[in-house]
Every structure is written in structure tokens, then in C-alpha cells.
């Protein structure tokens, strides 16, 4: 059984671990963002977590309301900023349950569309998005230059 719920203060360390696994290399940023979110939750954002049978967190999804998203025609748009399931819990419906709860959150706030993104080389994420009904609308290559 998968239980999806909004993140709570007691989840901070577990959320940090899952977030750092998805977006490695910025632990100070994660701690600062988690602390800020938990102390004053933004009205246009949410973090949903999935609990395993033992009560431990197995995944999370961060969502936000955006005024605009590429390929969308409505506003606001529910935006899946990030979704992650711990390796030992994948392919068991956890990500699908997190996304379904995120879609319900967005619908309750007047959204008629959801959007998301992924790194071009993250084919697993692409398969997940397409299996859940997302349609690719654009590809981008980003550049940077040291000054």
C-alpha cells in the first residue's frame, strides 16, 4: 500500500536524502530550501511524499503553480518540478501515486494542464512522463561560458 501525503517537519532529513539523490551536489541549497519551505510553506507550491509500509519515505514530488509553461495554453499550470522514488521502491506504482496526487493538487487550484521537464539524456524519465500521458512539446540545448 502506498500512502501519499504532504511533507511534514518530521520528514526533513528523509526529504533531504531523497532530494539530494535526485539533484546531487548542492546539499547546502537543499537544506536551506527545505528549512524555508517547512517554516513558511508557499501557497503556490507543495511537496508530496510517499510512505512505505514501514512508515519511511520512499519518494517525493515537488510541484508548483506557474503562470506559463511551454506547450500549455492555460494559466496557471501545474508544474512537476521534480519527482523521485528510491531505487528499492521503483516499479511499484509509487511515482504514479505521487503524480496522481500532484494532479489532484493542481486541479484543486484551478489548473487544467500539467507540465514538466527532464534532462535530454534521462530516458527513464521520458518513458515515465509519456506513460503517464505527458506529450513532449520541445527540446532545448543550453549553453554556458566561463567569464
Image: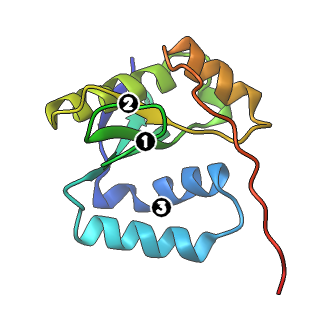
Q: Where is residue 123 in the image (x, y as percent from the top left)?
A: 75, 27
How crowded is the residue under tag 2: few (<14 C-alpha within 10 Å), some, or many (20+)? many
Q: Answer yes or no: do the residues labelled 2 and 3 have beta carbons within 8 Å? A: no
Instruction: Please name the residue shown 21% across and 28% down the image.
Output: 107
Which secondary structure, mark 3?
Answer: helix
Which secondary structure, mark 1?
Answer: loop
**Earlier sequence position, callout 2 versus callout 3:** 3
Give the camera-side residue of 53 and 103: 103
Marks 2/3: CA distance?
28 Å
Label 3: which residue?
Answer: 13
Where the C terminus falls, by quadrant? bottom right
Label 2: which residue?
Answer: 114
Colouring chosen for the image of the structure = rainbow
- Which mark is on residue 69? 1
Instruction: Please name the residue shown 69% across and 59% down the image.
Output: 24
**Earlier sequence position, callout 3 versus callout 1:** 3
Which secondary structure, mark 2?
Answer: strand
Q: Nearer the viewer, mark 2 or mark 3?
A: 2
Give the camera-side residue of 113 and 20: 113
**Earlier sequence position, callout 2 versus callout 1:** 1
- Residue 91's quadrant in the figure? top right
Marks 3/1: CA distance?
31 Å
Q: Answer yes or no: do the residues labelled 3 and 1 have beta carbons within 8 Å? A: no
Where the N terminus falls, by quadrant? top left
Amino acid at each position: 500500500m502506498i500512502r501519499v501525503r504532504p511533507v511534514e517537519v518530521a520528514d526533513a532529513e528523509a526529504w533531504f536524502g531523497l532530494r539530494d539523490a535526485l539533484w546531487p551536489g548542492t546539499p547546502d541549497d537543499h537544506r536551506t530550501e527545505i528549512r524555508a519551505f517547512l517554516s513558511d510553506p508557499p501557497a503556490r507550491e507543495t511537496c508530496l511524499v510517499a510512505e512505505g509500509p514501514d512508515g519511511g519515505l520512499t519518494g517525493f514530488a515537488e510541484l508548483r503553480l506557474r503562470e506559463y509553461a511551454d506547450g500549455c495554453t492555460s494559466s496557471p499550470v501545474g508544474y512537476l518540478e521534480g519527482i523521485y522514488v528510491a531505487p528499492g521502491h521503483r516499479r511499484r506504482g509509487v511515482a504514479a501515486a505521487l503524480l496522481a496526487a500532484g494532479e489532484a493538487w493542481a486541479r484543486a487550484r484551478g489548473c487544467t494542464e500539467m507540465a514538466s521537464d527532464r534532462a535530454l539524456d534521462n530516458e527513464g524519465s521520458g518513458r515515465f512522463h509519456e506513460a503517464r500521458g505527458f506529450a513532449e512539446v520541445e527540446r532545448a540545448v543550453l549553453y554556458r561560458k566561463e567569464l
